[in-house]
């Protein structure tokens, strides 16, 4: 199952890339939501080779997500590969500079089943694809607007 979205953001490309790769902020958000986050891989490099294992409870069951940076091309983008249960997902974040102060963010998420159980679950998820797609788009739309607001708010 594939999800895609595109957002034009009134922020320079370097700032958008920095926000997308602020891993410490992302880890803090996961911790605030009750997840356990374990870092791994090459922690000396800024991105490529970094890995995470995230354990959390969802719908009454313990889950474990393993993910890592697959490609790293600052400030044009990156891709990650993750596994959770019987699913594997690849997310590609692609940035294009439209002008010195405007950036286009394109996000592609491709989720594939890697087990029979996951294949059956994916069939039922396809019935809710429109709803899931809207939530996916809304999440990145919110990220884009938040980034623009942060840039417009004067720093004290």
Image (cartoon, rainbow, N blue to C red):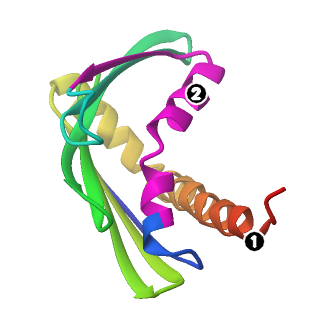
Q: Which mark is residue 28?
A: 2
For this view, does 131 lie left or right of residue 14?
Answer: right
Q: Which element type, helix, strand or loop, lies under badge 2?
A: helix
On the rendered structure, is 47 left or right of 144? left
Q: Viewed as shown, does residue 57 lie left or right of 44?
A: right
In the rendered structure, does residue 27 fall within the stretch colored magenta? yes
Residue 13 rendering spot, x and y as whole percentages:
44, 72
Which quarter of the figure has residue 124? top left
Q: Which one is earlier in the sequence, the residue at label 1 or at label 2?
A: 2
Is residue 64 visible to the viewer in this orientation of the structure? yes
The image shows residue 131 at horizontal and vertical percentages of 55, 54
Instruction: Decide: is 100 above or below 59.
Output: below
Decide which of 11, 142 is in the foreground and name it.
Answer: 11
**Extent of the magenta region:** 15-41
Asked whether 98 or 134 is in front, the reply is: 98
Residue that numbered label 1 is attached to = 152
Residue 64: horizontal and vertical position, in percent? Answer: 36, 16
Residue plotted at (42% across, 88% down) = 98
Q: Position of residue 38 (x, y in %)?
A: 38, 15
> CA gap, disc 1 to disc 2?
24 Å
* Left or right of residue 50: residue 5: right
């Amino acid at each position: 199952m594939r999800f895609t979205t595109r957002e034009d953001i009134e922020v320079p490309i370097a700032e958008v890339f920095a926000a997308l790769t602020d891993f410490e902020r992302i880890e803090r958000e996961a911790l605030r939501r009750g997840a356990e986050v374990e870092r791994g891989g090459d922690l000396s490099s800024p991105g490529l080779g970094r890995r995470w294992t995230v354990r959390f409870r969802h719908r009454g069951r313990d889950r474990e997500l393993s993910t890592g940076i697959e490609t790293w091309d600052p400030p044009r983008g990156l891709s990650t590969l993750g596994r959770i249960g019987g699913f594997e997902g690849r997310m590609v974040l692609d940035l294009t500079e439209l002008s010195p102060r405007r950036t286009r963010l394109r996000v592609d998420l491709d989720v594939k089943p890697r087990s029979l159980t996951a294949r059956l679950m994916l069939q039922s998820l396809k019935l809710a694809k429109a709803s899931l797609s809207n939530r996916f788009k809304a999440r990145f739309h919110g990220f884009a607007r938040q980034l623009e607001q942060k840039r417009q708010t004067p720093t004290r």
